[in-house]
Image (cartoon, helix red, strand yellow):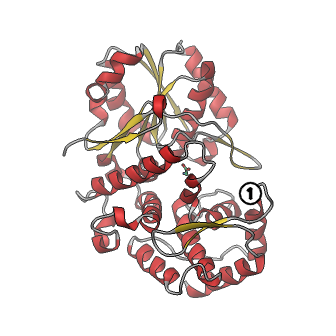
Amino acid sequence: MEVEKISVELGERSYEVLVGASLLGRADRLLTDLLLSRGWKRVSLITDKNVGPRYSGTVAGSLSRADLEVTVASVEAGEKSKNGRTAMALVDFMARSLLARSDLVVALGGGVVGDLAGFAASVYKRGIDVLHVPTTLMAQVDSSIGGKTGVNLEHGKNLVGTFHQPVAVLCDVEVLATLAPREYASGLAEVAKYSFLMPDVFSPSIESRGEFIRDPRHPQIAQVVMTCAWIKSQVVAADERDKGPRVVLNYGHTLGHALEAAAEYEGSCTHGEAVSIGMVFAAQVAEKLGVASSGLAERHRRVLRKMGLPVRPAGPAPDFDKVAGHLAQDKKSKGDLTMVLLEEEGSPVVRGDIDLDVLAGCYARLLEAG
Ligand code: GLY
């Protein structure tokens, strides 16, 4: 398959997202222009203990062929690594690897590695180049594009972070085949989100692709990744610093974040599962407020179920008071609860000042309807 390139147009911070198969071992050839223009000499490749053993040798080998001196650091896999202590240990690793300001960090892994390595690269010597090589579907279609980096505090997720655009993103769709089914499905929730926000860009539609969307080996997956990466690139180009239209990417994330926080990020609910349930909830809120006509939530359920995603919490659901406490933390500075809703598929709107009673009623219906 050809390597497709999507441009993220951000003036002097513009970069390309490359989507294709077997890219990891070809990084040296795919990045020839950057290798010539950026003058990198040393590279710190940051990965985790699940991804590293599989792929770091291939990526490091290909970068070494471009005469780069590569050092590799591997963090524990999972959200618990996304903290300031680990980020500073990585910065220290870069210093011990003698990285100059003109050198490179490569983030090889899922969203945690991307956020963490991106953050460390953005503060080391006040910011050095970072190349993202995302290995999960969620990271390929969402978190590796757009320059958000961050670590968690005990008080909440991503409370410390920077905007630091990568120099390029390499999305090798072949690696998706080795993801655990639940992790792959978690990324499908972001795919579903894009298809609700911009259905016309998907041709054929996500719904008509049938269940093979659930097969990461299916040849059409590369095209799905490309479509999502294109949507993300357009949204980011329109609002790099997340002060306006980029907020639509939070569709489903209001309840999603609250469910994740209520589960205390223990993995009982993946990010994608929480977002999937959060999108059904948002559709119910849209119907209740008369923003959307009835049927939206049911259509969401149909599409999400087809993708193998949950439409209500599995097992005992957190009670609404607990969820509401976390929803309150999602309030915007004005003090009202703001949500991205859909008037219909393809027409997102932002609604503020949503009454807690409406949310409580929709949450109760969410649990009943599952
Ligand atoms: N993942 C949401 C954003 O990049 O804005």
- Residue 333 percent coordinates (x, y): 78, 54
Q: Can residue 169 be seen here?
A: no
Q: Is residue 307 left or right of residue 301?
A: left
Q: Is residue 282 above or below residue 157?
A: below
Q: Name the quarter where the C terminus is drawn.
A: bottom right
Please name whichever residue, 355 or 31, is drawn nearer the observer in this view of the structure: 355
Q: How many marks?
A: 1
**Looking at the image, which residue is at 34% across and 73% down?**
207
Q: Is residue 118 left or right of residue 194?
A: right
Q: Any atom of ligand 1 within 8 Å of the CB at mark 1?
A: no
Q: Is residue 344 above or below residue 239?
A: below
- Residue 364 percent coordinates (x, y): 68, 84
Q: Is residue 225 above or below residue 105?
A: below
**Looking at the image, which residue is at 60% across and 75% down?**
281
- Residue 33 percent coordinates (x, y): 31, 22
Q: Amino acid at mark 1?
A: Lys
Please name whichever residue, 115 or 284, is drawn nearer the observer in this view of the structure: 284
Residue that badge 1 annotates: 332
